[in-house]
Amino acid sequence: MGEFEDEEFGRKGATDATSRRVGAGPAADASGEVPSWRVRARRVLSEEYILEEVEAGSLEAARVLSMHQTMKTRARLYAHQLRQLSTFFREDPAVQGLLDDADVTALKVATGLRCSYFHARAQVTDAHTAVEWMPLTFEHLRAGDLPEAWHHSLIRHVRRLSEDQVRQVDAHMAGVELPSVSKATFDKQVTLAVALALAGTVPTPPSESRDVEIVDVNTETGTASLYVTGPIPEIQALAHRLDIASRTVQKAQRAGLEDGAEGPLPFDIDENLHDRGRALSLRTLRYAILVHSVLDIDPVQETSSPYKILVTVPATTLLGVEDAPAMLEGMTPIPAEQARQLAAGESTWQRILTDPLTGAHLPVTADTYHPTTQMRLQLRLRHPVCAVPGCTRATVIAAEDDHIIEYDHDHPGRGGQTSLWNLHRLCWLHHKLKTAGLIDPTRDPEDDPRSGDGSTTAGPWETSWTLDGEIRTRTRENTDLLTPHTVEALERAWRVHQRAHADAMRLHAEEKARPHEDRAAEQRADAYRRAYPSRRSRRIIPPGPTPEETDPPF
């Protein structure tokens, strides 16, 4: 039997050695059988080895063993959950084991695990892959010999592979001494297994890699990145056109400033170029051109308003009577001053009436199948995301207004009415599933403002859902949140933010006024303290001044 010999995770401070090939047998196949070669650890992960760095029989030794057993227990529980998910998916009559039809199963799982639909679908897919396609490594996980985090990493590496390729990776990893090898060895073997499984496959052509996605969303700084992927010549051409355009605009800005031109300058996104006295940088201009240019889709006719941002502003805020915040898409509060700035350039206003106590939108009615403009606005506020429980798809684009009780086109008086009580917004996928009868929403008729004594209920209303005729759950509509209580809380938070911002600006000014040498020395010392937190008693002597600093007085 051929063997590889590799480093087991070593003592504290040690690193894995490079693998030394002792012998090699045949490559792993997709049959699911353990290969005739193995990657072995230098030492078996025994209790004696685990406790090698601590005193035997001590409290520390007991804690180390306890943590090790907790790791194994977590792995077993994780394996148990994967098997449950896999079984649920395999035996779901609405799916019949087809991954492309796992949407209904995901909705049921999301209800049970109290997670989003997208997270549930990913878990179902991963569970099927782990249990059905990778049974050999799954047995190590079930025995507690493969840490949960390691298995997550393994699954991430095979998500884009075919079933046959995944089975090849599983067979390769079964030849690794998983209970004892180090994390570095494990990662190295996973990379090798994936490379071997992909060997001989035709590379994906660049034309099939075109994609644009939003990444690195940072809610603390309020920034995000737009990631564009595509064939190298196309990306280079895009960058070249953007560079030429930004240089042309920069030249125009400089000319306008030199000539003392009055009025707005091109792509002055902050409207402060006259005060700055200099043109924007090429980096800033590239961004401005991308964000503020009209995208040409000729010969396709562009819609008159391809994208709208819905901001709900209290009338008292617009009049300056009070500083109650506005709401962005019915969910995110924005300061009153920013709301006034957004509203300043709008010439057309639409009124939405809300209940003064609950903040819910007062009902409006329609006598036809299609909702009125006012109803559609309110529906966007009530359902900023798909109404199906667990789904987080935004309804700004590609969502559909749906009648909870079906509208009777032949006899409108007999079917569900076109009213806010009987409407919600669904993403295209879940609207399709509802039409197919796989998900069924209902509402209590007593909440219908047209029923009973004719009294109106502003909402928010609850919806009961039946998923595939078996799973039942409930959801509640969103409101615009502009209630007196919420307004007071948001105003208080805004005042706290303003005080904190003023303090930060004051401290910034004080720091800026300090001598550069003092500030640099203190920051270097602070960096040492962060790097070596255990050496607090040691006096840290900062290094000498940098070339940018003044010479020392000695």
Image: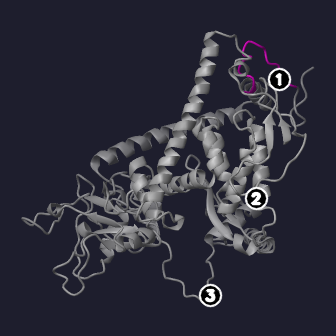
- Neighbourhood count class around disc 2 (C-alpha, 10 Å): few under 14, some 14–19, many 20 upward: many
Cα distance between the residues tagged 2 and 3: 44 Å
The answer to whether residue 289 is seen in the rendering is yes
The answer to whether residue 281 is seen in the rendering is no
Of circles 1 and 3, the one toward us is 3
Quadrant placement of the N terminus: top right
Contact (Cβ within 8 Å) of mark 1 with mark 3: no
The residue tagged 1 is: 542
The residue tagged 3 is: 298
Q: Nearer the viewer, residue 235 or 103?
A: 103
The residue tagged 2 is: 197
Q: Is residue 361 left or right of residue 230?
A: left
Q: Nearer the viewer, residue 125 or 216?
A: 125
Contact (Cβ within 8 Å) of mark 2 with mark 1: no
Q: Is residue 52 magenta?
A: no
Task: Give the percent coordinates (x, y) of residue 89.
Answer: 47, 57
Quadrant placement of the C terminus: top right
Residue located 87% across and 39% down the image: 19
Which amino acid type is shown beneath numbered disc 3? Asp
Please state the extent of the stretch shown in magenta in the rendering: 531-543
Of circles 2 and 1, the one toward us is 2
